[in-house]
Image (tube, rainbow, N blue to C red):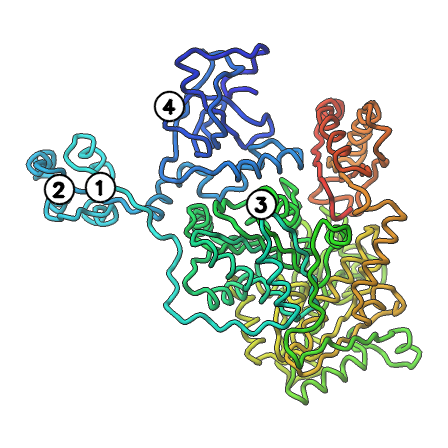
Amino acid sequence: MTSAAAPVDTALQPASAEAAAGLVRVALDTPADDYFDYLADAAVMPGELVVVPFGKRHVMGVVLDRPDNTEVPADRLRPVTGHLTWMPPLNAAWIGLARFAARYYHRCLGEVMLPALPPSLRDPQTWERLEQRARTTQYRVRPAQSEALLAAAPSRARTVRALAEALIAAPDGLRLAEARELCTAAPARLAEWEAAGCIQSTHADRPLLDKAPTQVPSVAPTLHDEQRAAVDAITAAEGYAAFLLHGVTGSGKTEVYLHAIAARLDEDPAAQVLMLVPEINLTPQLQARIAERFPDQPLAVLHSGLADQERSLQWLAAHRGEARIVLGTRMAVMASVPNLKLIVVDEEHDTSYKQQEGLRYSARDLAVWRANQLGIPVVLGSATPSMESWYRAEQGAYRKLVLRDRAQADAALPTVRLIDLNHERQRQRTLYEGLSVPLLDAIQQRLDRGQQSLLFLNRRGYAPVLACDSCGWLSGCPRCSAYLVLHRPERRLRCHHCGLEAPVPHHCPDCGNVDIAPLGRGTQRIEEALAARFPQARIARIDADSTRRKGSAQAMLDEVHAGEVDILVGTQMVAKGHDFQRVTLVGIVHPDAAMFSHDFRAAEHLFASLMQVSGRAGRAGLGGEVLIQTRYPDAPALQALVRHDYDGFAASQLRERRQAGLPPYAYQVLVTAEHAQLERALAFLQAARACADASPMAAEVQLHDPVPMSMVRLFNKERAQMLVEAGSRPLLQRFVSEWVRTFDDAATRVKGVRWQLEIDPLRI
């Protein structure tokens, strides 16, 4: 490995005695190498954050260890220039997790470690400001140094003199914040006086989490037999154990989590628990529920919606062991939680757990590996487990825990009915803005009863495309292979992929026809149609457009829970995790588009989505009904949904995948390439394919031909992909490890191509 100062010397040489005593090995956020060697004094320890010279810049890195020798000549080694002293080092277990992720996903170690840290810790210029929030610094006058201090504070500098007099007058000393109020130059003056021996400073960690108001913990509901059996199995586990908690919607999986968390926290006064949820909008209600159940246990929340400093403080609370419970989205799986004793992954099937940019990791898979590494239990919960998790449970790698009934004794699973749109057309019953007569009648019945309805359409905006009947023009995105979606309230066309916006044209840009019209329907159009049909109803829409402001999603959900909404229209944001007590009707408007996809997981994702949103109905004993509009009522996924038959659906899916040699019976790697010209992207993949064919292991893996991606153009870049499969994970990993080393040769032959490697891709 190299130093930032010099290339690798081919001969491994011991450094001089002076250098050997001061060597540190540092990981940097660069694809150049896994680590770089520098000089540092003995105070710099593994796991600490340092600032080092790298080329002409100074960058932040993580110290990995203190080696005895280096490949870099001693006269080329450069010293560490900064050192974060007030934060506890990252422990060996966290570094081991980062090493595994780097190895498994084929990235350099620093590319895993540094992005896993919160933004304020990655920027040395913010370290001082963060320290002021994380620690209390107290300054006191040393014994018999009052006169010397006054002599060092000239009377003509009034604010400096006032600071010195305040220090002398305060027997317990002054905090830095108090000193700043007296003198704006306080930090520099205090440092000067401390160096002169007039004063001394002491430091103490400041609590990072807001103390919850004292309250009596909420009473935990009585568990039914299946819940109790699940909790007993989890709490009895010694060492590593992976549990798949398969419970129908409304079966009380969250109560199982909370009881298991309580047991772990009671066992060890320093124990910490990590709980993952798939989406940011699910954290507020779960955070409130955890705070009610554990008012005396500090809770840290980690997700990308937090401001930089707040996220850093929450992360530090987990890292220092102050937070007993850590709740977060996928990024939280890489948080430093030194006393971790239990991991919970809620809605483990959700594709949001797979990172789609940078390090393309699966938070669920890393959670399982981390639990195994630490020798602790991990609980994966879902009403619709992923095929991979279900297969592992069937094979005995995970222990399956089943909740077959809803937690409330009077709450049964909703009745699911299919509305055959072909039959509706034969009866000459036309749709009202995409809504069938049976669905509209069912909504009216709920309005008459004072109950709530939820309409699910996973397509935001007013209409997916604007079209001209005269010449066939469509509102295509000039930067992507996609259409600009009409957002009628704002009178804007938007690309939901690259973010391009344009005003709605007054006439067709191609032929000048003024009669241009929207095609298809999104949540805005459904909301408008319902408002016209049911003018007395209170209607709310929850999607990415209506919840852009911070806190707006939770505010709207609170209105739904309070009964201030009669009809809720929403996308995937309302499909899972919400306990709507008054919702007795779920209408699924247009699921058919998801049935036609090149992705072999399309049926799995459709079934999971529809079962999750169906589970919002009938959760409080009022009786629930789910109406699904479709032109394909015989589709296996829909028929299984009518029967609430996840087991049968999963068995049929696994049979098909076994016959086709698809995951979980095979393992995949996807290589994507992008360039301004599609031919160049394909040429790069062809060159990479040629390198793969030359490998001795090529005969043991299946190399598919390079092809354009289904959305070939994105952000003005043409994209292509190549899939590699093997029946053995270790074999595929060994092959890829050798293969990626040849990519530089392929990139040399085809200039300007950006490529990305994805292990275990979820969308192909």
Which is closer to the viewer, label 1 or label 4? 4
Distance from Cα at disc 2 to Cα at disc 1: 10 Å
Question: Does any portion of residue 46 appear in the rendered image?
Answer: yes
Q: Dot 3, crowdedness within 10 Å: few (<14), some or many (≥20)?
A: some
- Tell me the amino acid under the disc marked 2: Ala
Which is closer to the viewer, label 3 or label 1? 3
Contact check, label 1 and label 4, Cβ < 8 Å: no
Q: Quadrant of residue 436?
A: bottom right
- Residue placed most toward the observer, 627 or 745: 627
Which residue corresponds to the image point at 84% horizontal and 26% vertical from the top-left? 693
Q: Is residue 321 left or right of residue 568?
A: left
Distance from Cα at disc 3 to Cα at disc 1: 49 Å
Tag on residue 164? 2
Secondary structure type for disc 4: loop
Distance from Cα at disc 3 to Cα at disc 4: 35 Å
Q: Is residue 52 left or right of residue 198?
A: right
Q: Position of residue 399 (x, y in %)?
A: 69, 55
Secondary structure type for disc 2: helix
